[in-house]
Image (cartoon, rainbow, N blue to C red):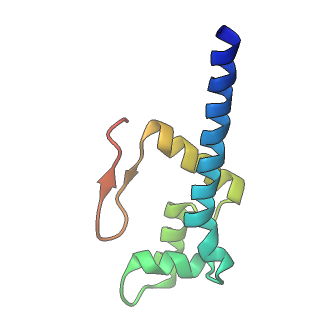
Amino acid sequence: MITFIIRRLIAAMFLLVVVSMVIFAIFFLLPKLGGQTNYQLATQYVGRNPTRAAVLQMEAQLGLDKPVYQQYWDYLRAIVAGEHYGTGVNSASAPFR
């Protein structure tokens, strides 16, 4: 019975990792595959008439200048630990921090 429970827990952990990868791919990689650059993605969060310095600062703040594996790690860490997102018009936070 214990081995059955352990196998189920391992399968559930594997499923959670796969689901998190799919969600990451949908929200973080599909816009890039659609032809948008990191600069264009960051421009959407700056506002009207953005300066180059403001866009580059937003790109660094969003983590778009990091490699994909680092972005995925930050994404997983934000899910587990909770993260405060204060960029853009709306502000949302995860209460587990």
Residue 48 seen in the figure: yes
Answer left or right for 93 relative to 52.
left
Q: Where residue 21 sits in the image (x, y, percent)?
A: 64, 52
Q: Residue at x 55, y 82 (%)?
A: 40
Q: Residue at x 35, y 45 (%)?
A: 94
Q: Where residue 36 sits in the image (x, y, percent)?
A: 61, 82
Quarter of the image for residue 16 reads top right
Residue 64 seen in the figure: no
Q: Which of these two is toward me, 4 or 91?
A: 4
Q: Residue at x 66, y 47 (%)?
A: 18
Q: Quadrant of the C terminus?
A: top left
Quarter of the image for residue 39 reads bottom right
Q: Residue furthest left?
A: 90
Q: Where residue 14 sits in the image (x, y, percent)?
A: 67, 37
Quarter of the image for residue 59 reads bottom right
Q: Residue at x 58, y 65 (%)?
A: 26
Q: Where residue 62 sits in the image (x, y, percent)?
A: 51, 62
Q: Which of these two is toward me, 97 or 17?
A: 17
Q: Is residue 90 above or below residue 56?
A: above
Q: Residue furthest top?
A: 1
Q: Quadrant of the N terminus?
A: top right
Q: Which of these two is toward me, 69 or 62?
A: 69
Q: Is residue 32 above or below residue 14?
A: below
Q: Is residue 8 above or below residue 52?
A: above
Q: Which of these two is toward me, 7 or 25?
A: 7
